[in-house]
Image (cartoon, rainbow, N blue to C red):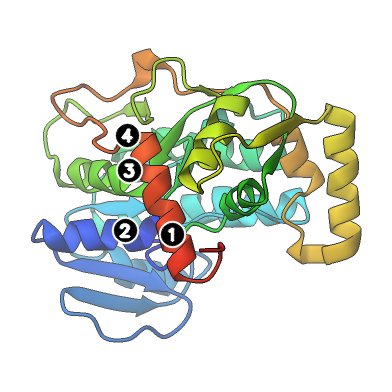
C-alpha cells in the first residue's frame, strides 16, 4: 500500500487488518511497529523501495498522491511520475493486481494541474499490462480529514462561504476504505480494467448549499447561512491566500479552478455493481460523526 499514513490510507490499513490481511506499506518517515504491518522506508521516487514494497505481494493499493502543489511539475512528480514508477515496479516483480485511487478531477484534465496529473496517472495505469481497477472518489470526509475542516469551522460560526452554484458527491472514508480492500482481494475478472466512480448513494449528489446545510446540522447550526461567491472572487481569494500563507495556502489558483467547476457528481453508470459494494454510512450521520471527532480534538467548539 502507498499513502498508508494519510487520511484514506490509515482507514484502509485498519480495514485490511480487520479483514485478516497483512500489509506492507511505504512510508517516508519512521512509523511505530504495528502487528500485521511491515513498513518500507522510501517514497515513490525510490525505485529500490518500490521493489521492496511490491515483491511477493498479492495486490497493491495505490493511494498516495499530491493534492496541493505550487506548480504543474509538482503535481506531475507526485501523481503521474510516481504512479508510472509503481506500475513499473509491479511489472518487474510480476505482481499483477493494482487498485489505483484516482479522483473525479481526472475527468476534467484541462481544468486544473491536479486534474491533469491524475488523468496522466490513469493513462499510465491503463497502458500497463496489469490487472487494474481504478476508483475515482468524490469529496472524502470523516474523522481525521483536514480538507473539509474549514467548512465545519465556518459552519460552527454560523456561515459557510461557497463557490458558485454546482453539485458534488461525497463519501465517508470508511466506505471508501471498505471498497479498496474488497477490490484488492478480488481475483476474478469482473472488476479488472474497470474505472469506478463512487459516492454515498445520494442520487444526483448534493448541491453546494445542501451540503453546507448538512454540515451546519452536524455542528448544531441547522440555520447556517450560505454565501455563494462568484468565480472571480474565489480566484482572487486564492491569490490572497497564496500571498498570506505561501506554499501552505489551502486555496490555490489551481484549486480555485477545481472548486468553481459545477459538476463533481459521480456518474451512476460508473458505480461499482451493487453485489460487490454499496455505501453503508448516510452522509448526515457521517458528518455528525466527523463533527464529534473534531470536537474531541479541540478543532470545533463544544
The one of 218 and 3 positioned closer to us in this rendering? 218
Element under disc 3? helix
Camera-near label (4 vs 3) is 4
Task: Give the alpha-carbon distance from disc 4 to disc 1, as whole Å.
Answer: 19 Å
Asked whether, in this view, residue 232 is left or right of residue 191, the answer is right
Task: Give the alpha-carbon distance from disc 2 to disc 4, as whole Å.
Answer: 18 Å
Q: Is residue 160 visible?
A: yes
Element under disc 4? loop
**Badge 1 local density, few (<14 within 10 Å), some, or many (20+)?**
some
Element under disc 2? helix
Check if mark 4's residue and mark 1's residue have beta carbons within 8 Å.
no
Report the residue at 51% width, 49% height from top: 219
Task: Give the alpha-carbon distance from disc 4 to disc 3, as whole Å.
Answer: 13 Å
Camera-near label (2 vs 4) is 4
Q: Position of residue 225 (x, y in %)?
A: 69, 34
Q: Earlier in the sequence, mark 3 or mark 1?
A: 1
Q: Position of residue 45 (x, y in %)?
A: 53, 67
Report the residue marked by disc 3. Answer: 176
Camera-near label (4 vs 1) is 4
Q: Earlier in the sequence, mark 2 or mark 4?
A: 2
Q: Earlier in the sequence, mark 4 or mark 1?
A: 1
Q: Is residue 127 visible?
A: no
The one of 115 and 44 positioned closer to us in this rendering? 115
Report the residue marked by disc 4. Answer: 282
* Marker disc for residue 7: 1
Report the residue at 56% width, 66% height from top: 299
Report the residue marked by disc 2. Answer: 11
**Badge 2 local density, few (<14 within 10 Å), some, or many (20+)?**
many
The one of 102 and 55 positioned closer to us in this rendering? 102
- Residue at the far left in the pictured view: 20
Check if mark 2's residue and mark 4's residue have beta carbons within 8 Å.
no
Amino acid at each position: 500500500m502507498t499513502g498508508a499514513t494519510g487520511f484514506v490510507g490509515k482507514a484502509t490499513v485498519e480495514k485490511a487488518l480487520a479483514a485478516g490481511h497483512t500489509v506492507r506499506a511505504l512510508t517516508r518517515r519512521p512509523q511505530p511497529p504495528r502487528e500485521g504491518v511491515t513498513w518500507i522506508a522510501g517514497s515513490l521516487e525510490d525505485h529500490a523501495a518500490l521493489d521492496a514494497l511490491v515483491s511477493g505481494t498479492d495486490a497493491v493499493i495505490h493511494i498516495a498522491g499530491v493534492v496541493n502543489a505550487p506548480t504543474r511539475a509538482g503535481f506531475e512528480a507526485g501523481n503521474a511520475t510516481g504512479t508510472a514508477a509503481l506500475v513499473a515496479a509491479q511489472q518487474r516483480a510480476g505482481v499483477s493486481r493494482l487498485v489505483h485511487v484516482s479522483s473525479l478531477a481526472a475527468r476534467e484534465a484541462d481544468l486544473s494541474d491536479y486534474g491533469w496529473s491524475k488523468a496522466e496517472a490513469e493513462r499510465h495505469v491503463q497502458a500497463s499490462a496489469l490487472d487494474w481497477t481504478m476508483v475515482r472518489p468524490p469529496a472524502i470526509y470523516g474523522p481525521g480529514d483536514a480538507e473539509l475542516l474549514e467548512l465545519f469551522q465556518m459552519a460552527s460560526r454560523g456561515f459557510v462561504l461557497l463557490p458558485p452554484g454546482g453539485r458534488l458527491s461525497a463519501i465517508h472514508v470508511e466506505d471508501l476504505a471498505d471498497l479498496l480492500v474488497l477490490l484488492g482481494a478480488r481475483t476474478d475478472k469482473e472488476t479488472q480494467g474497470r474505472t469506478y466512480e463512487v459516492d454515498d448513494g445520494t442520487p444526483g449528489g448534493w448541491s453546494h448549499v445542501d451540503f453546507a446545510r448538512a454540515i451546519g446540522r452536524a455542528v448544531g447550526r441547522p440555520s447556517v447561512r450560505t454565501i455563494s461567491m462568484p468565480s472571480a472572487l474565489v480566484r482572487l481569494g486564492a491569490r490572497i491566500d497564496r500571498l498570506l500563507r505561501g506554499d501552505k495556502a489551502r486555496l490555490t489558483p489551481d484549486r480555485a479552478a477545481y472548486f468553481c467547476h459545477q459538476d463533481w457528481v459521480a456518474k451512476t453508470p460508473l458505480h461499482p455493481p451493487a453485489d460487490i459494494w454499496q455505501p453503508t454510512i448516510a452522509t448526515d450521520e457521517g458528518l455528525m460523526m466527523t463533527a464529534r471527532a473534531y470536537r474531541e480534538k479541540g478543532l470545533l467548539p463544544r
